[in-house]
Image (tube, grey):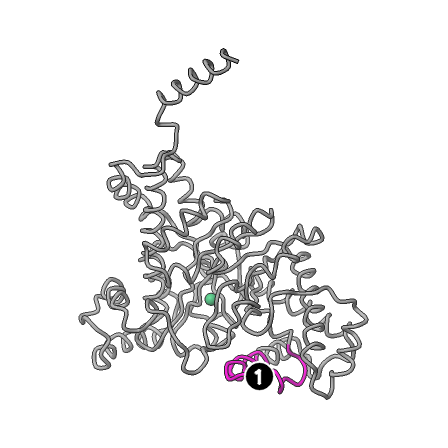
Amino acid sequence: MKHFWLAALALNLALAGSASAQSTPYPAADLRSLYEDLLGKINAFPIFDHHAHPGYADDSDVDAMAAPPDMSSVLRLREDNPEFVAASQALFRYPYDDFKPEHAKWLADRKKDAERAGGTAYFDQILDQLGIETCLANRAFMAPYLDSKRFHWVFFGDSFFYPFDNRDVIGSNPDMGVYIPLQEKMLSRYKKQMNVEALPADLAGYEDFVRRTVALNQKRGGVAIKFEAAYFRTLYFSDPPRERAAAIYSKYRSAGVPSADDYRVFQDYIFRALVDEAGKLGLPMHFHSAVGIGDYFSLRQGNVLNLENVLRDPRYRKVNFVLLHGGWPYEREAALLTAVKNVYLDTSLQSEMLYPSQFKAVLKQLLTLYPDKMMFGSDAFPFNDALGAEESFWVAVRTSRMSLAAALAELVSERAISTDKALELAHMYLHDNAAKLYGSAVIAGANGGSK
Ligand SMILES: [Zn+2]
């Protein structure tokens, strides 16, 4: 026994001697210089933006959804945030210090000129200024002014959930009154695209329409399918028997307003068909997995943990799932779900909504869990004619590079990881993880992506 303690004591002394290999709870005096050094390097790293809505303000295809009337906006995303002015100054040499209407007009005019001139050079130039090499564009349809070598289409899957008479859903609250008619519009555009006039006679026909639409969208350059289902319903998808879904389809195909239960069961079935098709096509599935805008977004129903039964289903091992916005405010739950081999997340939205000191803490946690699963995202979106997706990209990129450098500097200074490891993690998060996930589908020039 005595020998054991002596041996333990000797070991402790040996460890104390190699303090550099032992992580500590406080950063050392080198924190600030580590941060400056890492930031300098990280500022030059190329970015793969995993989630954005690029486009001009008057292009309604930038999203399949629209903001509800009179919604509350978090502080940093309000139009009077001076950081947006800084963004306009950095990107366009905007000559004013505010967005007073008479000043904002200068900016709006400039963007209108670019839109009128046409061509892909304008948004390519924005990406170049920010060091973004590749950007996934989550849009209803792509636009000819987005370069198909740089911007890759992520199309929407939610409209397949709403083929019946939607009056009850639309009337359920004012926000659904905005959202669901847009889903109906999206579905009718898909029907037109597939030359489907009326709803197919039975569930088999509808399922075929759904699968063929998804396959054609992929052929047209789609690299993933996105669901903002959390805005409309629970993210918990049951696994109903086919006969039940078939009976519901027959009942409401031509008339009648489905009960909430019937509609959900039908949607759950169609969702399962979509997961199956995505697996067959090798198409990653994206989920809005964070809190949403509007007064009626349900935090409980939108909680990313509702997806757990789908994400951990062994039948779907070959389907890649990505949790957009990293589940925030349940970002730790989302991060833990990426332990599953085929589950990833991006930090879009968080990179715009959280200030660097807050986002630094998030990244520090994420990068010490499954750093091979975490991806940068902006969620850039045009706010109005003056304040566009361009400024939104700028804020997200700048916030992410700073927060990443700060999180990694702390980890290096606390002797948790080496500087080399920090730089490796930065590359993975900003670019390499996403590039690996999408592979040949997004290699510049390799994807035709017809418009
Ligand atoms: Zn988005």
Q: Would you identify the image quadrant in which residue 414 lies?
A: top left
395 or 236: nearer the viewer? 236
Q: Would you identify the image quadrant in which residue 239 lies?
A: bottom right
Horizontal and vertical percent position of residue 217? 60, 67
Name the residue rendered at 46%, 76% in the picture.
294
- Which SS type dominates the magenta stretch? helix
- The answer to whether 249 appears left or right of 237 in the picture is right
Circle 1 packing at 10 Å, graded few (<14), some (14-19), many (20+), is few
Name the residue rendered at 41%, 78% in the picture.
71
In the image, residue 138 above or below residue 12: below
340 or 14: nearer the viewer? 14
SS for callout 1:
loop
Q: Give the residue number, with chain letter if any, for mark 1.
A: 172
In the image, residue 265 above or below residue 350: below
Magenta extent: 162-185
- The answer to whether 318 appears left or right of 355 in the picture is right
The number of numbered badges drawn on the structure is: 1
Horizontal and vertical percent position of residue 288? 52, 64
